[in-house]
Every structure is written in C-alpha cells, then in structure tokens.
Amino acid sequence: MSLSSLLVPAILFFALGMFACLIKSDLKFPPDMHRMIVIYLLIGIGLHGGKELAAADMGDALSAVWAALGFGIALPIVAYIILRGLGKIDPLNAAAISAHYGSVSAGTYMTAVAFLGGIGVTYEAYPVIMLAIMESPAIMIGLVLAGYSRRVMGGTSKADKGMMKHLLIDAFTNGSILLLFGSMAIGAAVSAPSYHKIEPFFELIFMGALCIFLCDMGMEAGKRLSEFKSVGVFLVGFGIAMPLFGAACGLFVGHFLLGYSIGGITLVAVLAASCSYIAVPPAMRLAIPEANPSFYLTLSLGVTFPFNVVVGIPMYYAAAQYLHETYYPW
C-alpha cells in the first residue's frame, strides 16, 4: 500500500475539512447543503446499483442479503460483549454504542467507491444491496440489547413495547433506506436509453459532489476531536479495534463465502467495518435517552469514520488484494 493510494481527491478533501476545523477557519457550508448532497449521493448509488443488478444473477444477490443480515445481527452483539466484558461500560451506553457498529456508514461506502474508482478497480453490484439492508437489523438488535440492559439494571420495560414498535417501523421506513431501495428499483426498471438521459447528472458529477460531502464531514469529525477526553482511552481504542475486527469478518465473507473480486471484497470489508452516524444516532437518542450521546457520536464521527477514510479503506483493499492473489494466484 503506497502513499499514492491515499492521494484520492475524496480523501484529500476530507483531510482539508479536518484541517479547516483544527485551524479554526471560518469555512462553513450552507445548513441544508449536507442533507441535499446526501440525498443526491444515495440516489446516485442506488441508480448505479440497480442498473448493475438488472443484469446480475439473483442467486448471488440473495447471498449478499444473507451476509448483510448476518453482519447486522452479529456485529452489534460482539461489540456489546466487548464493551461490557473488557471495557466495563454500563449496559445502556454499551447497547447504544453497539447498534452503531452493526450498522453502516454510507459516507464510508461512498469514499471506498471513490477510492476504487481512482485506482481503476471494478467491483460487483451486490454490496449496494448490503448497504441498504444493514441499517435496520442493527437498530433492532440495539433495541433488544437496550431492553436486556434495562432488565439487568432492574428497570421497568412496560413502556418499551410501544417504543420498540415505533422504532422498528422507523427502521424500515428510514429515508436513507427508502432512497436506496427506491433508486435501485428505478435503476433496474428503466430502459438503457432512459437511463442515459440522467446518467450525466448522477454519474459524471458524482465524485465532485462526494468531495464536497467529505469536506463537510471532515469539519464535523474535527469538531469531535476535542471530546476525546470525555470518551476515554478504552472507547477510543474500541473505535479503532472494532472496525478492524469487522473488516476481518468482511474480508473472510467477501472472499471465501461470496467469492467476490478484489473490489467487491474491499466493499464488503468496508461495510462490516463502518459505523453509522446518520440513521442510528437519532434512533438511539429516542430509544435509550439514558445513554450519553457524546460517547457514540464521538466514536462514530471522531474516531471510526476518520480512521476508515484515511487508513482503513487502503488497508482493507491491500488485504483483499493479498487474499485474492494468495488463494487465486492465477
């Protein structure tokens, strides 16, 4: 893995955003711009994935669905066990943090797509299905862990049933998930001539929009650096170790179980290593108001997201390349 692998415009713009925050620059983006660009990027990912899926094998797509469900269920449980057993984190904070690490970061996935595109590596369409699916199971597991934690702490759980139903509905009707699934369906349904009419807007300028998004995210991550003291040494270490563990699982599943190419394996590893900072935080804020938001927000935006963007993605790609060349040297 060379230094040139980090010199991708998207990653450099993320670094620029962090640098602007660290030097206390007056650089700011319009308040609604972040939401608008996220919507644009999600639609672009969905349309591209749908177009590819239209020509893909549905049996392989089903394998990706099962892998996504497995990650969304298993990773939060592993995170909870680590936080409680090794870190001695209180049950409710552990449950809230765990849900973030079973979910996914669309921003990290987009950065990985930009990274692969920058070095000319192709990949399968199936990881975009995993991106759309992994959000909901993690939220559900977070709710289960929260209910378990309250019982452990002796709290009442009568009011939890209504909240759980409400949050489960929200998990399936989440705007990001709706955009991804809806865009995939549209991308798969429209004819090639129709798709070509919107292709310049959703594909040709996609990377430029991603650079603006990551510059904004860099500034958000920079704001979280000052909160490291409140998070603690163990949680900072967890914010780096957990994505490495998730990436190792993703590399194994992507290569040995799904049989993807180097690019596809990299994206599966990125999905398993990422940590949600959009859909899960508000859900956990509602479901577990006792948990400290600075813990899971600092970990997701201040530790795991920057680590994955700057260090993790090139590392996961190098590991995927090694696996592919070692076990399929031809």
Image: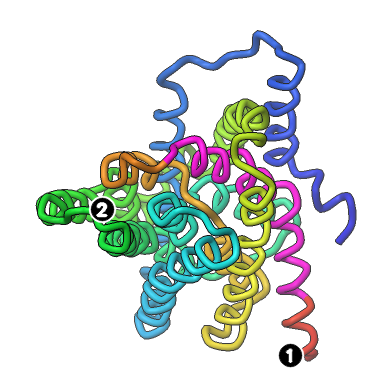
Most extreme residue toward the front, as rendered? Answer: 154
Mark 2–mark 1 distance (CA, rounded to whole Å): 39 Å
Find residue 293 and report its horizontal and vertical position in percent. Answer: 44, 37
Instruction: Name the residue at 25% across, 58% down.
Output: 154
Q: Are marks 2 and 1 in contact (CB under 8 Å)?
A: no
Tell me if 46 is positioned left or right of 318 in this view: left
Is residue 218 depicted above or below 189 in this figure? above
Find residue 64 and report its horizontal and vertical position in percent. Answer: 42, 76
Q: Kindly identify which numbered label has been placed on residue 328.
A: 1
Q: Kindly identify which numbered label has been placed on residue 135.
A: none
Find residue 190 and report its horizontal and vertical position in percent. Answer: 29, 56
Instruction: Name the residue at 75% across, 72% down.
Output: 319
Please tell me which residue lies in front, 168 or 117: 168
Across the whole image, how many numbered discs are drawn on residues? 2
Q: Which residue is mark 2?
A: 171
Is residue 92 depicted above or below 39 in this figure? below
Magenta stretch contains residue 293:
yes
Magenta stretch contains residue 255:
no
Instruction: Name the residue at 47% across, 43% down.
Output: 277
Instruction: Name the residue at 45% across, 53% down.
Output: 90
Is residue 198 depicted above or below 36 in this figure? below
Q: Amino acid at mark 2?
A: Ala
Q: Amino acid at mark 1?
A: Tyr
Q: Main secondary structure of the magenta part?
A: helix
Label 1 SS: loop
Lower sequence index among marks 2 and 1: 2
Residue interval drawn in magenta: 292-321
